[in-house]
Structures are given as C-alpha cells and as structure tokens.
Amino acid sequence: MLLFQSMLHELWHAARALLHPHLKTADLQRHISHAAVAVVPIRALAERHRKAVLSHLLELPPEDRYLRFGYAAQDAQIQTYAEGLDFAKDQVFGIFDRRLRLIAVAHLAYSQDSHAETCAELGVSVLPHARSRGLGSKLFARAQVHATNDRISLMFIHALSDNSAMLKIARRAGALVERQGSESDAYLRLPAPSMHTRVSEMVDDQIADTDYRLKVQAKQFWEILADVQEVRRLAQDAQTKVSP
Ligand SMILES: CC(C)(COP(=O)(O)OP(=O)(O)OC[C@H]1O[C@@H](n2cnc3c(N)ncnc32)[C@H](O)[C@@H]1OP(=O)(O)O)[C@@H](O)C(=O)NCCC(=O)NCCS
C-alpha cells in the first residue's frame, strides 16, 4: 500500500508537470493551498455512499457532533441530515481507509438562495483516530478546487470560535475569519476556474477512483482468504474428530 501511495504521489506530480512544466510546487501551494501537495485519495461520494456517510457521522463523539453541526446532534438528527443529503446538487467528498471505512467526510452545500447562488458552505469531519494527519486540510483543499471549478465565488465555514483546528485550516487557506462571540464564520473568496484547477480536479478524481478500486479488490481478496482459511480449519477439525 505504501508503494502504491508513493506511485500515486509520483503520478500526481508527473501529470501536473506535464501540463504545467513551468509550475513549481511553491506556485501550486499558493494556488490551491499547501495541503493538496501530499497525495491522499479523496473520492467524490454518490448516492450509494449515503449509508457510509451516516455511519461516519454517527461515529463522531458528542463533542465533535457539537463542533460539526453547531448543536448537540442526536442520532435521529444525524440520520435526518444524512437522509437529506442531495448528492446531485451538493458535493460530498470522503477518505476511505483500507477497510473501506469512511474516516473523513466533507460536505460542500450549495446555496439554495437565488441571490447567493455562487456561495457554498463547507462542513468537515475526521474521525478522532485519524486527526492531525492533514486529512482535514486536504479535504478543505479538495473542496476549494471543486468549488472553484463550479464557479463558486465564496466558500464559507461556520465554526465555534474555540475550534482551533478548523479555523487554522481556513485561515491557512486564506479565509477571512469573523468572530461573533462563541461562534465564527470563515469566508474564503475563490478565483475563477483555470486550466490548472480543472486538470488538478481531473487528476485527483482519477487517483481516487484507482485507489478505491484497489481497496475494493484488496478487501475482496482478504475476505476470500479468510473464507478459505475457515474452510480449511473446519476440515482439519473434522479430520481430528474422525482420526483415532
Ligand atoms: C476540524 C477537523 C476536521 C480537523 O481535522 P484534522 O484532520 O485533524 O485536520 P489537520 O490534520 O489538517 O489539522 C489542521 C491543523 O490543525 C491543528 N490541530 C489539530 N487539532 C487541533 C486542536 N485540537 N487544537 C489546535 N490545533 C489543532 C493541526 O496540528 C494542524 O496544524 P498544522 O498543520 O500546523 O500541524 C477535525 O478536528 C474534526 O473532525 N473535528 C470535529 C468536527 C469539526 O469540528 N468540524 C469543523 C466544523 S465544520
């Protein structure tokens, strides 16, 4: 898996170098924030992932639910939220671990208001065991590029003022943070889409698809192996019982 990740990393850089031979890493960093440089496959989620998103959110402990939703969301409220996700209109991104468990999710919700149709709100969650490894920053950067390509001009994040991790991610991406007591809003102005943002997203999608397919195959392989071992164990047990 490590070898595969390093291959993906190389592929990512090679693809960008081919299309932008003049673009150095420092320029990329300025364009789409430093977090996108190290490759973490981030998959655009669809209807079939709704249950996985729900399971991910239900795994968040109470304090994280408060940070994510701005209130102490109960299971039923999270279920209503997950059932209401509009995968056709909004964009949901996820990071899967090797067992295909969603360990991080970002929901880019497009404004329903016709006067603010170029605005979108981002909500992010990373399971506690996977934190401080840059996944939150990478999801932010991924959503930033996608929103740019979708001609969103303003991405905003609503966070509690003591949510240092989220506000750090937003500030680092260049967002303006406005504090109103215990709550804060971070506003990030986005540029017009460019060849670079479009190619960047295409490459990221390809990498995430390949990574996901490989994880599915690996999971199937281990499941088959476990079945074979179980059959062998049962056969051995049966033989032991028959043998004098
Ligand atoms: C906010 C959240 C998404 C960050 O995810 P993450 O994967 O840990 O983020 P990163 O690893 O990219 O960390 C971002 C920065 O915050 C820092 N950070 C992480 N946890 C921190 C904490 N508790 N206090 C202060 N800084 C923290 C990291 O060190 C990192 O800074 P660095 O790059 O200079 O080291 C995650 O903590 C989370 O899911 N929280 C619960 C839900 C939530 O608050 N959502 C945001 C509101 S929508």
Image (cartoon, helix red, strand yellow):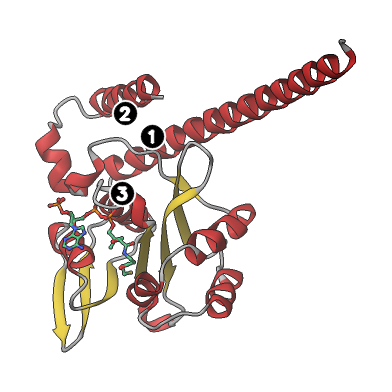
Residue 169, position as x, y percentages in the image: 20, 59
Whether the residues at callouts 2 and 1 have beta carbons within 8 Å, the answer is yes
Residue at left offset 35%, top offset 51%: 129
Sooner in the amino-acid sequence: mark 3 or mark 1: 3
Tell me the tag on residue 203. 1
Asked if residue 62 lies left or right of residue 82, the reply is left
Three-letter code for the amino acid on which mark 3 is drawn: Leu
Residue 63, given in percent of the width and then of the height, sits at: 34, 74
Residue for badge 3: 135
Disc 3 + disc 2, Cβ < 8 Å: no
Q: Residue 25 sits in which quadrant?
A: top left
What amino acid type is highlighted by mark number 1?
Val
Which quarter of the rendered image does ligand 1 occupy? bottom left
Assign a secondary structure to mark 1. Answer: helix
Cα distance between the residues tagged 2 and 1 = 7 Å
Residue 15, labelled with which disc?
Answer: none
| Front in this rendered view, residue 109 or 128 | 128
Work out which quarter of the rendered image holds the C terminus and state it.
Answer: top right
